[in-house]
Amino acid sequence: MDLIERLQQIDVSALSDADKTLPVADPALRAMIPDLRMAGPAFTVLAVDDHLPVMAALAESAPGDVLVIATGGSERAVFGELFATEARRRGLAGIVADGYCRDLRGLRQIGLPVFARGTTPRSGSTASRATSGATIAVGGVDVSPGDIVFGDDDGLLIAAAERIAAALDTAELIGRSERAILAAQAQGEALHSLTNYDEHVAALDHDEPSALEFRVDERR
């Protein structure tokens, strides 16, 4: 199973817990379509008050890519239903815009993972010849072409593939442990008894180093 397939099996929060230094985008950049997970290499483009560069980037991107759009603070929509439909047709994994989208009803029907700061009916011009494939800033994170973009309802994590790969085993263990805890809670067990809560608090109260840990068989 490759990196992208493995990411599709875990939550963004588990990966973030596995390595708390991994870059997370501004929480204002959020999933427009709920209950979808997205992972893929970034295909970057800058589109400031003009969505022609996004159209060009769609033509250049490859199946599995996440189209990542910087807008320079633009308050106009840089993509909507037509562009998302084309992204789906081309096999893209999703779209991220550090700005606005539109046609939300249509986007819901398409079902492609899309992230933006919100929606607006206003669109920009179609005259810019800005090129794609540069390092851009999105949600406070520098994104280079090929960086892995991983998103779900909790937000967006973006980093080089090797950094994500280094944390993935731990993230998968966290995911298994959390599922086991939830299964135990469903059977009536208390969260506190499934962790080292009592020992952890006692150690902290005595100024001793400690960390909160799961105490559950993740194979449940």
Image (spheres, rainbow, N blue to C red):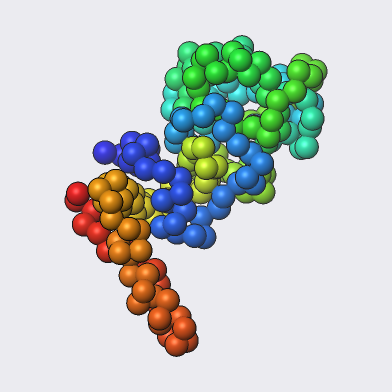
Q: Quadrant of residue 206?
A: bottom left
Residue 27, position as x, y percentages in the image: 63, 45
Which residue is at the far front? Answer: 188
| Direction from residue 99 to residue 22 in the image, left or right | left
Q: Is residue 37 visible?
A: yes
Residue 56, position as x, y percentages in the image: 63, 20
Residue 5, position as x, y percentages in the image: 33, 36
Q: Is residue 127 above or below residue 137?
A: above
Q: Quadrant of residue 19?
A: bottom left
Q: Is residue 46 visible?
A: no
* Quarter of the rendering occupied by the N terminus: top left
Which of these two is toward me, 220 or 141?
220
| Direction from residue 212 to residue 157 in the image, left or right | right
The structure residue drawn at horizontal position 30% and vertical position 61%, both measured from the top left corner, is: 194
Which residue is at the far bottom? Answer: 206
The structure residue drawn at horizontal position 79% and vertical position 19%, both measured from the top left corner, is: 122
The structure residue drawn at horizontal position 66% and vertical position 41%, both measured from the top left corner, is: 28
The structure residue drawn at horizontal position 49% and vertical position 37%, both measured from the top left corner, is: 152
Which of these two is toward me, 141 or 179?
179
Residue 175, position as x, y percentages in the image: 33, 49
Which of these two is toward me, 67 or 134?
67
